[in-house]
Image: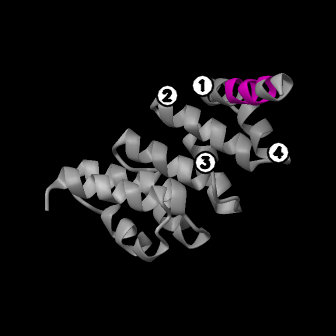
């Protein structure tokens, strides 16, 4: 059918966590229509499981920065060593939004602060700044509560 309608349905599948349709969403992450691919990756933010890590890591390296951003956000919900490593790498992405989403995801995932500290002390100034800013936002929100 129409690509716009298909993308809208795919987004809804994720938002409402219709697990039976997750294989369909995963299939759509390979679609040649970029809007469908973005919608499928965005849906994975809501319904990703640990068995989807390899797909999300692949998507975190996609040519389209919006796909990369949603893949990193979805990986942020999966607290595994592979997911943390992929998110850590994404803090060095060329696109600011991807770096920022990666920094926010990393802070959510890394309670030990080991990975956060390695990014802050790393050679990539932009990755370090993104993590510092995200950490500041989290700490500032906790103070207000």
CA gap between label 4 and label 3 equals 14 Å
Is residue 102 found left or right of 10 in the rendered image? right
Q: Are marks 2 and 3 in contact (CB under 8 Å)?
A: no
Secondary structure under badge 2?
helix
- Which element carries disc 1, helix, strand or loop? helix
Which colour assignment does the render follow? one colour
Q: Residues within 10 Å of mark 4 (few under 14, many from 20)?
A: few
Give how far apart the Cα atoms at labels 4 and 1 are: 18 Å
Return the residue at label 1: 126
Q: Which residues are magenta?
A: 133-140
Most foreground residue, 94 or 48: 48
Mark number, residue 114:
4
Seen at 37% across and 66% down, the residue is 25
Residue appearing at x 49%, y 28% in the figure: 96
Circle nearer the N terminus (3, 1)? 3
Question: Is 61 inside the magenta-drawn segment?
Answer: no
Under circle 3, the secondary element is helix
How far, Cα to Cα, is label 2 from label 4?
23 Å
| For marks 2 and 3 on the same chain, the one whose residue lies earlier in the sequence | 3
Check if mark 1's residue and mark 2's residue have beta carbons within 8 Å. yes
Residue sitting nearer the eye, 49 or 95:
49
What count of labels does the image hold? 4
Residue 132 rendering spot, x and y as whole percentages: 72, 26
Residue tagged 2: 96
Is 54 or 19 nearer to us in this picture?
Answer: 19
CA distance separating discs 2 and 3: 14 Å
């Amino acid at each position: 059918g129409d690509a716009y309608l298909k993308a809208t349905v795919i987004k809804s599948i994720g938002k409402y966590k219709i697990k039976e349709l997750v294989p369909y969403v995963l299939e759509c992450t390979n679609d040649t229509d970029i809007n469908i691919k973005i919608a499928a990756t965005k849906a994975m933010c809501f319904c990703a499981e640990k068995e989807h890590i390899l797909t999300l890591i692949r998507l975190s390296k996609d040519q389209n920065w919006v796909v990369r951003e949603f893949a990193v956000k979805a990986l942020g919900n999966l607290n595994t060593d592979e997911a943390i490593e992929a998110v850590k790498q994404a803090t060095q992405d060329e696109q600011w939004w991807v770096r920022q989403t990666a920094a926010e995801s990393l802070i959510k995932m890394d309670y030990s602060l080991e990975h956060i500290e390695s990014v802050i002390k790393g050679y990539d100034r932009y990755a370090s700044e993104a993590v510092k800013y995200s950490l500041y936002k989290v700490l500032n929100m906790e103070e207000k509560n």
